[in-house]
Image (tube, grey):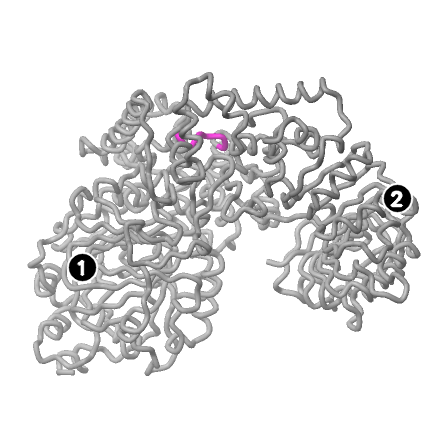
Amino acid sequence: MKDYAGSRSLRKKHSKTYVDGISSSDDEEEMKTFDPEEKVRTKNYPPYFITEMKGDDVTYELFQRTGFNNPIFIPEKTGLQIRVPDPSFSVSDVRTLVGGKRILEVMNCATQHNAEMTLKDFEEFFTDPDRDDTKLNVISLEFSHTKLDAHVTAPKVVRQLDFTDNVWPRHLKDQQDDSTNDMSKMFYPKVQKYCLMSIAGCYTDFHVDLGGTSVWYHLLRGQKMFWLIPPTQTNLKAFENWTLSGKQGEVFFGDMVEKCGRCILNPGNTFLIPSGWIHAVYTPVDSLVFGGNFLHPFALERQIKIAQIEETLKVPQKFRFPFFTEMLWYLLDKYCYALLGRHHLDLEDHVLNRLLGSEEERKAFQDNIGHPHITQQELRGLKSTVLYLHSLPVNKKNVPSFIKDPVSLIRDIRIIVEVHKNDKSERAINGRPLLYWPGIRKEPNWFAKGKRKLKENKTKAKRMEADGKMYLDPLLVCSYCRLDGWFVDPTRGDITRNNSTSSLWECAECFELIHPLCLPDFGLNSSPIPEMPNLWKCLTCQRNPPALKSESASEPVKEEAVNNDNYDLSKVKDEPEAYETNNVEMQVEGSNLSQVDIVKDEPMSVDDVDMEKTSISELAENVKREVLDMEEKELKMSIRVKDFLNRQGDKYNKIRFLYSQSEESRQSAILEDPTVILKIFWFLGTPDIFRLRTVCKTWNKISRDKLISGFVDLSGQKVTANMIHATANLKPTFILFDWTNIAKQQLTWLLPKIQATRRLSLVGLEFGSQVSALISSVCPNLVDLDLSFVSNLNDSALNKLLRFGEKKSNLASLRKLSLCKTEITDISLRYISQQLQFLTTLSVAYCVKLTDAGLAQIGDPDLYASQTLVHFNISGCPGFTDSGLVHLSRCTVLSFINCQDTGISATAVDSFVQIRPEHRVHNFIIYKK
């Protein structure tokens, strides 16, 4: 390197590299690293996750609707309302406008260390035709308040979203006069405008941008390659471990995750990277880039998550988002003013007039607030913000001096959460920013564009309905990001797509195609439909169940059971521990027989069912009424449902044919159409299915579809011989005889004929006269058996079930066993530990005869249970005490213990968790993080 890059300008003070906030280097001076050019040559990374859009389509409304979950690639800047210099602009021009004496932090990519250098020296090195092979990278030149500032303006949507512009008090930003990033002279988060200048061959290893910020990125000259990884919980944990391992130079993080996409930027391209995305950047050609970082209201949860990871990794403050905590306080106050019309700022009158307008303007604003709807992302973000601020120690809460009463501010946020928890998404998605300062709407089209586009879309939809036309999108794409099942632009034909690896899921309720990654986390578990690949009940429908079409449909999910919105924020001050597990989905072990695998198979004869003709005719009439109702609704289908029909291709061509017929011929045809009738049969119970099979041959055939032919539920029924015979013909995989009158002789006859059955529930029966039929060599190889509330089920009875004389019992392959509210004692736990070598889930809730001696059997390292048991429910057993919990600590894979209503104390539970740091406890339930 020549002298301008020598001791005169390349300062001797080196520091460990922190790229945009999170470290990606180790402590060695010379860092061994792989060659990124070799990665480019030897391995193909498809353009996963990238959504290509026109500048006109990147609107505030888009962010409201999608939450900005996937990177956006804009080939040409038209429509973005962005300002950047013309392509002739060079590094020399940067020096002229910023100043040659400006000190830069320059990364030497060979060592992955930063050093200080003047802009003048860097420009001379960059433009020297005889420069050496040193790869210098400038990625932290923030040029606000320099002459270059006037030549660069972020895209309009970024300006509408950016907290620094719309939340941080404007009068503080106005006071900024220093153009450097000296924190002692900084009055606002100075991260909005960066100039990145990179020598060919520069490589920035995988990182997450500071504070979980999103990024806008415009390539003026050169070329850039991005490797991109989504911020899933698994990926973030792997990234955290990779960062702490100190082996970044040896391992390419993109090869450690399930999917790593790549995007190539050329001059004129603009790129938007969402919050929290893990990415690496390679520069094949000398490059000049303008960009900036911004926080926005639709990614608050992710932004806070990244801030917590930064704390875990001990990232120095200078590499984090400036004033991050203070910004959150101002954000809460901004929402209070926007939604309630009151603020908590303690400022002089002339400053308030500058920020919020005159008193008359403020009063007019308050009188006209009404009830603006907010998105679910914003609502959850407000909760996360309050919980995060509360979790901070007192010395890190950083309440701004202008916030006069933070407690009152939190109370107002609680009001907002209660008032807006049922806001409608369609009303929240209006293209109008909620957070802004007066005077920011100087542009006449600040709001108009999103509103006009929404109106145009509605008008177009109405016109299409009026014309009787069907909006047909022939591509299977996510309704949020518009990418296909492999996170690729559907127009790309050079990507290998294997149907079995598609990430698109279709909701059985709303028919929406979605990547689960694109949906915000509601704190719920997904509900896949058994035996149906990529079909589920989406998280939105779980949270807000749609109205059911008939009384025979399943009961709607209780709002309070799945709604994670009911945070009692009034308790934040006094009960910090109460909020640590609000988003954790915990399932108390016991009878989980409501979650079924639906499969059925063979027909039964008419003679097999004992029924009256009147009941058949009534049932048929009800089904006909259902079909006619469905027909009327289908004729008024939304564009989304029509889209669904089109996506299914040949499978639903018949439906489209039916709707082309006359009304009279259509009704009779629909009553015999398998696709329609099957959807109705799916909601009916097993006794009704048995009866409907005798109506006609068509319905008999439809009832044998695998969607409904493998699950028999006769719970609470008076079981007849015909029902038993029908069950044998079906050969189901899952049978429920809970609280029935089925006799031992009937079970004995049935068992040899249902060898395909794997799950059996006999809840509430009697052992001697019913359940004892399982003591047989012809019993199917069950993996899930529920004997809860079985009377007379004691140690001797259980021993007979598990041993079967000298032979190996067919129950030896059990993985789940429930013995709730039975008469077993500690001896039974010994039998279970000795005989069931594959058992992972065991429930003995409310077995009052059990004591700590039984837990000693479970924890015996010489028996199977200590090595295989994962879930253990011991709730309601008063005989279990603190000493019994110690025995369970010897179980090597135990990850869930329900200790509610036992003799085990809170102190013992806490001690158990302390020796297992990967576990947590909530309300006497121990579970793995």
Vertically, is 769 above or below 245? Answer: above
Q: Residue 395: x and y, percent? A: 48, 56
Q: Which residue is mark 1?
A: 266
**Which badge, 2 or 1, comes first in the chain's sequence?**
1
Image side of residue 922 versus residue 624, left or right = right
User: Looking at the picture, how far across and down is residue 289, in whole percent?
Assistant: 19, 60
> Around disc 1, counting alpha carbons within 10 Å, would you say few (fewer than 14), some (14 to 19), or many (20 or more)?
some
Element on which disc 2 rests:
helix
Nearest the eye: 800 or 71: 800
User: Is 374 rendered above or below residue 183?
Assistant: above
Question: How far across and down, in percent of the image, does residue 796 sit?
Answer: 93, 56
Amino acid beneath label 2: Gln
Amino acid under disc 1: Asn
Relative to 460, say whether 256 is above or below. Answer: below
Q: Would residue 831 be found to the left or right of residue 295 on screen?
A: right
Residue that label 2 marks:
745
Question: Looking at the image, can residue 341 be seen?
Answer: no
